[in-house]
Amino acid sequence: MFVDELVVKLIAGKGGDGCTSFRREKYIPMGGPDGGSGGRGANIIFKVDKSLKTLIDLRYKKIIKGDKGVNGKGSNRNGANAEDIIIKVPAGTTLIDMDTNLVIADLIHDDEEFIVAHGGRGGRGNKAFATMQDRAPKMSEYGEPGEERIVKCELKVLADVGLVGLPSVGKSTFLSVISASKPKIAEYHFTTLSPNLGVVKLKDHRSFVMADLPGLIEGASKGAGLGHNFLKHASRTRIIAHIIDMGGYEGRNPIEDYEIIRNELKEYSDKLANKKEIVIANKCDLPNFDENYKAFKEKYPHIDIYKISALNNIGIDEVLTKIADTLDEIGVEDIYDETDYESHVIYKFKNEKPYTITNDNGVWIVKGEEIEKLFKMTKFTEDESVIRFSRKLKGMGVEEALEEAGAKRGDDVQILDYMFTFKE
């Protein structure tokens, strides 16, 4: 089964917890803190595997979760990092963050890899909190939560030549004749529901990869029919080979067919419409071919058209040589899409506070990524950890912001699912 698009939730591993411990040995009554820090949680990494051609291995993995780092221990023993999760995907896979709609990574090279969700850092043990002022801290941290993301994986096949045309114009037959690919062929519309790739080898030892892409219908650029499923694959090709049923089989009008395809390519993207195009007039063995060919040349005199019969293997060598020559002329084209990449956002200035305060039926609700992370890493069973948490909140201006919002001493304050009393 060919799967070229899916959504998966990624939860990177939580960091290991830090340890609160003191050195306790005979003859050393005042041993200092020796609690180790936790290990890093598992990263979730996407890596290209050239042997894969589809995303089917991810189809039933709705949630992928990384392991937690190992907790720190006494005697200054730090926890080990969790083993990273490697997710193998085909070349041409684009990863999109569903929350921001930005491209996280575009993986096109063999063995290329990218960390999509970072594991949380390990919580610090009490040894790490020791200072000249506090030589024996009685606190440590829980591990940092791992990064969570909902990611859309989108596969766009990588091919030198994209074979386009309306349904049943002979694309699959043409590909089966010129390559070792054996696509399903039948005389009904939408035979090809997924891209077929074929390696074409010429007599002069040149070669290229051609993709027979799903047939278009009018309105495809707006999502009709197979729509974007077709066009996103065409965007990754270097040139377009446009096959037309010039024989007028089933009463087709070749000029109208050609214009439908050209309009859909242009509507989808200018970059796709401006790719080098080679027009192939198929079914030259049919009675109406010459009449339709003449009318087409009168309408488009500047377009070079190559006559073939894919079924009877007529004119094939000439068109393949033209395709190979064209690929040599244009060289290697940039196959990255013109889109917004997450890595392009270097710094985004935020004038607002890193948290929000709202009131719900007398309860003050504090929300903010940094505050919630600090909360999750605080061990409220340790008095010094609680004091540190309060000090951090005050340093972030939360106490002052609550007072400005109208909070009074004794009011309830909520962070995540936990309630606190607003005190001095």
Image (cartoon, rainbow, N blue to C red):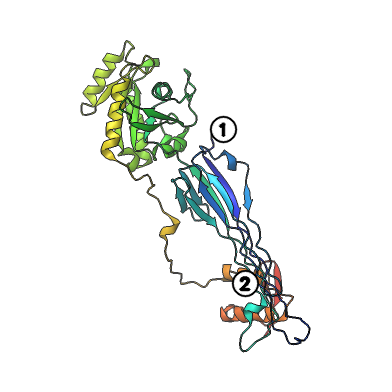
Q: Which mark is residue 1?
A: 1
Identity of the amino acid at label 1? Answer: Met
Instruction: Estimate the spatial distance between the alpha carbons at disc 2 and disc 1, rounded to whole Å.
Output: 45 Å
Residue at the far right: name it: 26
Up the image or down, 287 lies above or below 395; here it is above
Q: Nearer the viewer, residue 179 or 247?
A: 179
Looking at the rendered structure, the secondary structure element under dot 2 is helix
Q: Which mark is in front, 2 or 1?
A: 1
Determine whether, in the image, residue 56 is placed left or right of residue 300.
Answer: right
Which of the two labelled residues, at mark 2 and mark 1, occupies the earlier sequence position?
1
- Inspect this view and state whether residue 61 appears: yes
Circle count: 2
Determine whether, in the image, residue 1 is placed left or right of residue 276.
Answer: right
User: At which x and y percent is residue 334?
Assistant: 34, 45
Q: Nearer the viewer, residue 357 or 194?
A: 194
Image quadrant assignment for residue 383: bottom right
Label 2, on which residue?
Answer: 374
